[in-house]
Image (tube, rainbow, N blue to C red):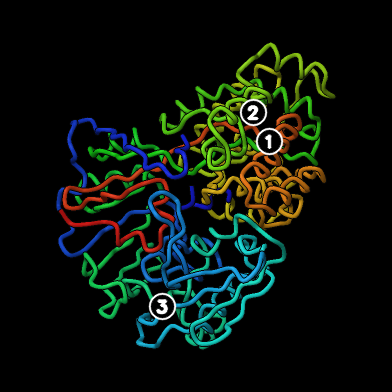
Amino acid sequence: MRTRFMRRARWAAVGAVSTALVLAGCAGGKGGGQGGGGDELRVGIVGLDFSNIDPGQGFARQVDAFMLEYLMKLSATGEVEPNLAESVEQRDDVTYVYTLRDDVSFSNGEKLTADDVAGSINYARNPEFSESFRYGDIADVVAEDDKTVVVTLNAPTASFQYVLAMNGYIFDVSEQESAGDDFGKAGAGLVGTGPYVLDDLNTSNGKATYSANEDYWGGDTEFDSVTLTGFADENSEALAFRTGALDVAFPADPRAFASAADVEVTTVPGTRQGLFVMNTQVAPWNDVHVRRAVAYAINKDDIVNVIGGNAEPDSTIIPPSQLLSIATQDEVDSLLGSIETYDFDLEAAKAEMAQSTVPDGFEAELQTPSYGGYVEASQAIAGQLSELGITLTVRVLSEAEYTNTFSQPHTEVPVQYSFFNNRTPDPGGMPKNALSSSATEIGQNNFADYVNPQVDELIAKGDATTDPAERFAAYSELLAIVADDVPYVPLYAGNINVALGDAVEWPTFNAFSTDVAPYVLEIKKK
């Protein structure tokens, strides 16, 4: 869940459609994409690795989203709906039965079968893939017959309903097997059921081109073709947008993009959290007084301003809007009033520092990638912590260096500012991914290496029941413990943004839009 180039949110209550805010460019008009794409939709993306679009690798999500689909999908309000599966039912607490649609074929004409679905999901579950943790609740996936897929879980899991609506791209398994080790390289072997077919993947220039799948089960597409172009940074993407070379972009810094591209940026409450991570196994970050001092010393309002105002300050690792799916507003407010939220308080920070093993401060390195506001936010945090005698040297990593950190022990990057994209509407998402002791493994997302058996028990308890009161009780206790231990400093809940050229519109754009596969179906010509 740490942002990997393309993955990057104030929270809207689940079940409510958010009203979009619009940030205007310097000319006050909608100036980007003036040329218009006509029957071609032109999409920009920053920092995406086009070299291997194997869906099991994780980095490929944006490229694959035009041609591959999930079993289920999310609605605009975060509810699970049928997609390739026409229905799902539970035989018991751990068994989910998906019945496939009859009218779905791959772009090569082969009919979608349960063997393809089971094979695709089992492929993604391969523990060699860094994204395999997303399927950790699954014990087994089998094809019962040609149109029935049975998924068995390790234990009852309330949040599982979202897993196959937001993960698990389905592909033609026979094509994947034929491609062998070349699967995903330059698009080899990738045949999906989606509305577009990959025509060309230019790995050197970072560009993918697609044409409409004439036999798409969902009907005719809005555009005859799609081009996805990668950019090294958001400024170059904004300049391309200004010249009319793009129709769609997803800026991380909407204010800067709106100004540089001379375009309106639509912003809605989304599913992105900014956190300051401190590895609890590495000195001096293993000292809880240091971590509490840091939490008090960070001015969250300033960080929000640094990243372009594209967020609201936050204080809990489970965002309030997710808690509102299982509790009332009064109950959530009461909980937040009962736990330490570490509002900016420099005197309290100094008092905690005085109790630590390093009362006079220390030096450390703060590594950061070079895109999406990481550098600016990291520098701001370093400046704030200098008030405690903590000297953080910000080291900007190249794309290759940053990518390499995902294959290293978390202790190699003991402190960092990071985006977490909590992509599920369920309140159990962040605890499982950022707090569970099972997520401390290389490639998984407990970057703090936080281990607390009591928290593990509460994570399991919250996910083992669908009763809202029981879940809220478990997560309330969990949040109180985590607030005391402070493995992370929640900084903000950020937004999701889109810039649209004059020729297109996205009437349904919402918090879950980019997690709907394929989202291109929601974009319309004007």
Answer with left or right where residue 426 lies relative to residue 67. Answer: right
96 lies above or below 326 = below
Q: Amino acid at mark 3?
A: Arg
Dot 3, crowdedness within 10 Å: few (<14), some or many (≥20)? some
How many numbered discs, if any?
Answer: 3
What residue do we see at 80% from left, 18% from top?
A: 359
Q: CA distance from mark 3 to mark 2?
A: 44 Å
Answer with left or right where residue 509 lies relative to residue 71. Answer: left
Residue 114, percent from left and from top: 51, 82
SS at mark 2 in the image? helix
The residue that mark 2 highlights is: 335
Disc 2, disc 1: CB below 8 Å? yes
Q: Earlier in the sequence, mark 3 or mark 1?
A: 3
As drawn, the label of residue 101 is 3
SS at mark 3 in the image? loop
- Foreground residue, 326 or 33? 326
Residue 364, percent from left and from top: 71, 32
Q: Quadrant of residue 22?
A: top left
Q: Which residue sits furthest right?
A: 357
The residue that mark 1 highlights is: 476
Residue 62, percent from left and from top: 42, 60
